[in-house]
């Protein structure tokens, strides 16, 4: 009987080893999120900046603005300049009206001289003088009309300046780009902001990314869109298991990252994989996780 028990012992150990191997995860990694650093788009004092770390923000939400007093005054000055330039058109139109009336008067005189010339009561010089006067008025009217084009170009240029100032004023407002949670805050109200200065960092934590690394032999089993089991620490002895989906697989191999513990493992070539996981609030950036590939 004792001999029979010893015969079964290797079989039990073999089955136990297989069971342990089946329970091992296929890949390890850490959770991350797509972090966006929002920077200032204008120079000036931060008159309002109402966020704190951990604040939930909506996409398109205005959370503050930079002082726009100087930009507003420049815009008002440009508008006044445009109005003054446009008013010159009225003056030119009045000048043309005067010249047109003079032309009508000269045409009447011309008709009279023509009648007198036919009757022999006027000279050719009188007719030539009237013709010269008409030609002069036509040239004056043409010169005045030519000024309209220059004024229109000036108004167009001023309108472009106003549009640029309006865009600069819009950029002075700090608009949150995505739905997410504020991870870090880099500025405070009343500080002077400069173009490109980071103001805060935000990320959408409703869906996390578990970046893991698989070997070349595992790669054929990893397909974009497939479901995998995701495990992360629940406590010192237990794991929480949820599901995730493969969202990206690196097209090129790389050496195993240094976060892998043993030197022997670090020299192997692996492929990075991003697994998308819905977050119920338990997952944090930098938290370790692991996956188990689900056999089809």
Image (cartoon, rainbow, N blue to C red):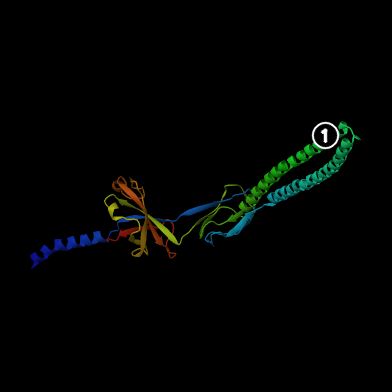
Badge 1: few (under 14), some or many (20 or more) residues near its Cα, within 10 Å? few
**Observer able to see residue 68:** yes
Residue 160, position as x, y percentages in the image: 66, 46
Toward which corner of the image does residue 31 lie, by quadrant? bottom left
How many marks the image carries: the answer is 1
Q: In the image, is 56 to the left or to the right of 128?
A: left
The C terminus appears in which quarter of the rendering?
bottom left
Q: Residue at x 35, y 61 (%)?
A: 230
Q: Residue furthest right?
A: 121
Instruction: Judge whether 21 appears above or below 107 on screen.
Output: below
Toward which corner of the image does residue 88 lie, by quadrant? top right
Instruction: Judge whether 190 appears above or below 116 on screen.
Output: below
Q: In the image, is 236 to the left or to the right of 6?
A: right
Instruction: Judge whether 148 appears above or below 20 on screen.
Output: above
Q: Residue furthest front?
A: 119
The N terminus appears in which quarter of the rendering?
bottom left
Q: Residue at x 75, y 42 (%)?
A: 145
Residue 173, position as x, y percentages in the image: 61, 55
**Observer able to see residue 189:** no
Residue 136, position as x, y percentages in the image: 81, 36
Q: Residue furthest top?
A: 125
Q: In the image, is 99 to the left or to the right of 291?
A: right
110 or 18: which is nearer to us? 110
Provide the secondary structure element on which disc 1 rests. Answer: helix
Residue 56, position as x, y percentages in the image: 53, 62
Q: Which residue is mark 1?
A: 132
């Amino acid at each position: 009987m004792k001999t029979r028990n010893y015969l079964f012992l290797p079989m039990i150990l073999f089955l136990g080893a297989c069971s342990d191997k089946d329970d091992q995860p296929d890949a390890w990694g850490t959770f991350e999120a797509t972090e966006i650093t929002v920077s200032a788009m204008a120079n000036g004092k931060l008159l309002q900046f109402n966020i704190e770390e951990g604040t939930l923000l909506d996409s398109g939400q205005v959370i503050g603005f930079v002082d726009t007093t100087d930009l507003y005054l420049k815009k008002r000055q440009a508008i006044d300049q445009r109005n003054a330039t446009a008013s010159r058109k009225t003056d030119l139109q009045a000048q043309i009206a005067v010249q047109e009336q003079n032309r009508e008067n000269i045409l009447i005189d011309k008709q009279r001289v023509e009648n007198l010339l036919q009757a022999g009561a006027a000279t050719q010089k009188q007719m030539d003088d009237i013709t010269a006067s008409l030609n002069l008025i036509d040239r004056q009217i043409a010169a005045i009309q030519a000024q309209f084009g220059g004024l229109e170009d000036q108004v167009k240029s001023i309108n472009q300046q106003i549009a640029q100032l309006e865009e600069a004023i819009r950029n002075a407002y700090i608009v949150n780009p995505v739905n997410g949670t504020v991870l870090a805050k880099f500025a405070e109200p009343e500080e002077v902001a400069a173009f490109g200065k980071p103001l805060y960092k935000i990320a959408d934590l409703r869906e996390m990314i578990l970046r893991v690394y698989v070997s070349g032999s595992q790669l054929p089993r990893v397909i974009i869109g497939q479901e995998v089991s995701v495990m992360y620490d629940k406590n010192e002895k237990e794991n929480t298991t949820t599901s995730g989906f493969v969202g990206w697989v690196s097209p090129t191999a790389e050496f195993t990252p240094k976060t892998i513990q043993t030197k022997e493992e670090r020299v192997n070539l692996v492929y990075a994989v991003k697994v998308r996981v819905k977050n119920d609030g338990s997952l944090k950036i930098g938290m370790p996780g692991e996956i188990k590939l689900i056999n089809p």
